[in-house]
Amino acid sequence: MQSAFKEKVLKLFESFPKMDKMGFLASFFKTSEEDYTDAEYIDIDIVRSGEQVAPVLRDLSNGAVAIADDVFTGKQVKPPVYKLSRPVNIFDLLKRQPGENEYEAIGTWFGRLVNILKRGFQLMYGMLNRSIELQASQVLQTGKLTLTDDAGNEAYVLDFNAKNTHIANASTMWDQTGADPIKDINTLADAIRADGLVDPKNIIFGAKAWDLFIQDTKVQNAVKKDGLGLGNLSPRLVNKGGKYMGYLESGAYRYDLWVYNGRYQSFNNSTSNKFVDDNKVIMLADVEDLDFRLVYGGVPSLGMTEPFASVVPDTVIYPNGGMKVHNKVYNNDDKDTTVAQATTRPICIPVSIDRFGCLTVKS
């Protein structure tokens, strides 16, 4: 019976939340096995190189032409720490829980406690997953991270030093006379091509930015639906919350167009915010051409004691390069309280810093 109960609880932990349907912007950041670390600090080497061709020799007797290595910037960063807890007082076990009615049998006290803790972990996992998406949104729109504590104060700031030509304004705001959205898009694309050495592929619009973009007559004539062409998209981006709007060909470029309307609430504020600012447009190379990493720092742990060690996994890693969370459950006997705790240390790192950009198109 205990074995069947354990299997049931473990299955609950494995099934929530459905991370494969969340996090459109974080989908551009990949996590490989070596990105799950036990380290406190992460070393980043951001490489910038050119497109020089090889010169010929005037004479075979001359020595080889010496070349210099690519220029790289090394940086050591400390991933931020997210740690959440859900305390459960012993008297909470007397209260009716969601899905129950007052006539139902209570069952074992431990079984009821585990179900309450499970819902607590589910809530915490969702919050942590949205925090990763917020990291990705900040990196792609500003080139830096600015994370806040539970009081809304800046607690973690990291600048990846994106070039000014990549985080820029439209030449004329798109709600003004004389605006030329396609020209602005191509100018940013040229900067990414010149510095990142790849063609940009994906454009992600804030809601208002898309409305202004599609109102332009030249844009209306250029955008193609083509049955939405979903079969040509990177599987990493499909069903992640972004809406595919078609494609646009302009000069040497072919852009896939997206609108993303995902939202979040700050911890200390119930106001709903959008991950992509209404007035911004993000441009990136294809997923396969990006070296964007979602890396996890180490979280030391001494493990859990029984009976929780048997039914709560101490670590959860979601499939396909997903979120890694460290779980802990312990008793605070002085307060007759059991505490569920979830900890993770993710950081979104745009190693190929020159292969994305962002335009502000409306002030």
Image (cartoon, rainbow, N blue to C red):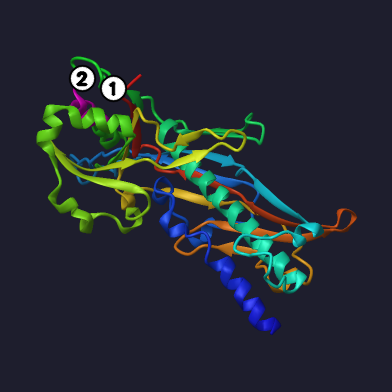
Residue 34 drawn at (x, y percent): 52, 59
- Amino acid type at image mark 2: Ala
Q: Residue furthest left?
A: 221
The disc at residue 170 is 1
Residue 343 drawn at (x, y percent): 65, 52
The quadrant holding residue 219 is top left
Q: Which residues are magenta?
A: 179-188
* Mark 2: secondary structure: loop
Judging by the rendered image, the residue that carries numbered circle 2 is 179
- Amino acid type at image mark 1: Ala
Q: Nearer the viewer, residue 113 or 192?
A: 113
State yes or no: discs 1 and 2 in contact (Cβ < 8 Å): yes
> In the picture, which quadrant includes the N terminus?
bottom right
The quadrant holding residue 311 is bottom right
**In this rendering, is residue 140 above or below 338?**
above
Task: Identify the residue at horizontal 49%, vertical 45% (top origin).
Answer: 348
**In this rendering, is residue 168 above or below 120?**
above
Does 325 lie within the magenta span? no
Residue 321 visible? The answer is yes
Q: Nearer the viewer, residue 167 or 343?
A: 343
The quadrant holding residue 339 is bottom right
Q: Residue furthest top?
A: 177
Q: Main secondary structure of the magenta part?
A: helix
Residue 136 drawn at (x, y percent): 46, 42
Give me the C-alpha separation between circle 1 and circle 2: 8 Å
Task: Identify the residue at horizontal 23%, vertical 26% (top origin).
Answer: 184
The disc at residue 59 is none
Task: Identify the residue at horizontal 36%, vertical 37% (top origin).
Answer: 354
Residue 267 drawn at (x, y percent): 60, 38
**How busy is the neighbourhood of tag 2: few (under 14 within 10 Å), some, or many (20 plus)?**
some
* Mark 1: secondary structure: loop
